[in-house]
Amino acid sequence: MQDSTLRPATKADSQAIAALFLISSDGLAAYIWSRLAGPDEDLIAVGARRYAREDVAFSYQNCLIAERGGEVAGMLHSFPMEHTPDAPPEADPVLRPYSELEDPGSLYVSGVALFPQHRGHGIGTRLMAAAVARARDLGLPRVSLICFEQNAAAMRLYRRLGYREIARRPVVPHPTLHYADGDAVLLARPVAASG
């Protein structure tokens, strides 16, 4: 079994981050990026362009890369969720449930994914532990994330790692989303929790 290593992402990782974000978002990134794409622009190119930016939440600067066997195996993207009381309500009905599930004051894990050939080696658990460590380093009391309740494997992992439900909103169906029904669930765990 090959050992994995974790490292901060670089701008050169933007394309791999985009590919992994398409996996982690269960179709939500495809929905967002398709609205930003130029004529005939590939979704991974859109995502890579977004993650190549600097000093914004959705940047490679907020990503941790897992490598295994000399190649990118997975990633975790997280950023501090700030309280923005003056932000207007999300106008897009497909995106509204997710904007209503924010947990200000937490480290928000917006994406964690592994390429299929690297699953089953504990890398996802290591990435999630790194998120807790980052929250602790930033002085944040909890880590939060949103998961589709229909994604049973991910929900099992997060519950095993100490995440508990805070709130939920019904999914608004769209052809790009992997799940047409059920809820999007906001989960969080305190940094001080074990596991």
Image (cartoon, helix red, strand yellow):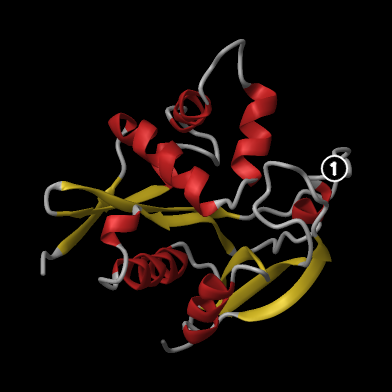
Where's residue 94, x and y in %?
Answer: 81, 45
The reply, left or right, for residue 108 in relation to residue 48 is: right
Q: Is residue 22 left or right of residue 87?
A: left
Query: In which quadrant of the rendered view does residue 137 lie?
Result: bottom left
Q: Residue furthest top?
A: 39
At mark 1, the secondary structure is loop
In the image, what residue occupies the spot 58% across and 74% down?
152
Quadrant assignment for the N terminus: bottom left
Report x, y in % for residue 17.
40, 41
Residue sitting at x 31%, y 35% = 13
Q: Which residue is mark 1?
A: 90
The amino acid on which the numbered mark 1 sits, given as a three-letter code, is Glu
Please name the residue shown 72% across and 59% down the image.
Answer: 102
Residue 44 position, x and y percent, is 47, 30
Number of numbered labels in the structure image: 1
Residue 169 percent across, percent down from the top left: 82, 64
Camera-side residue of 193 and 91: 91
Q: Up-down: is 105 above or below 178?
A: below
> Based on the displayed image, in which of its 4 quarters is residue 118 positioned?
bottom left
Residue furthest toward the bottom?
194
Quadrant of the image containing the C terminus: bottom left
- Residues packed near mark 1 inside 10 Å, few (<14), some (14 to 19) or many (20 plus): few
171 w.r.t. 140: above or below: above
Q: Residue drawn 88% across and 40% down?
A: 88
Question: Measured along the vertical axis of the image, is residue 38 above or below residue 114?
Answer: above
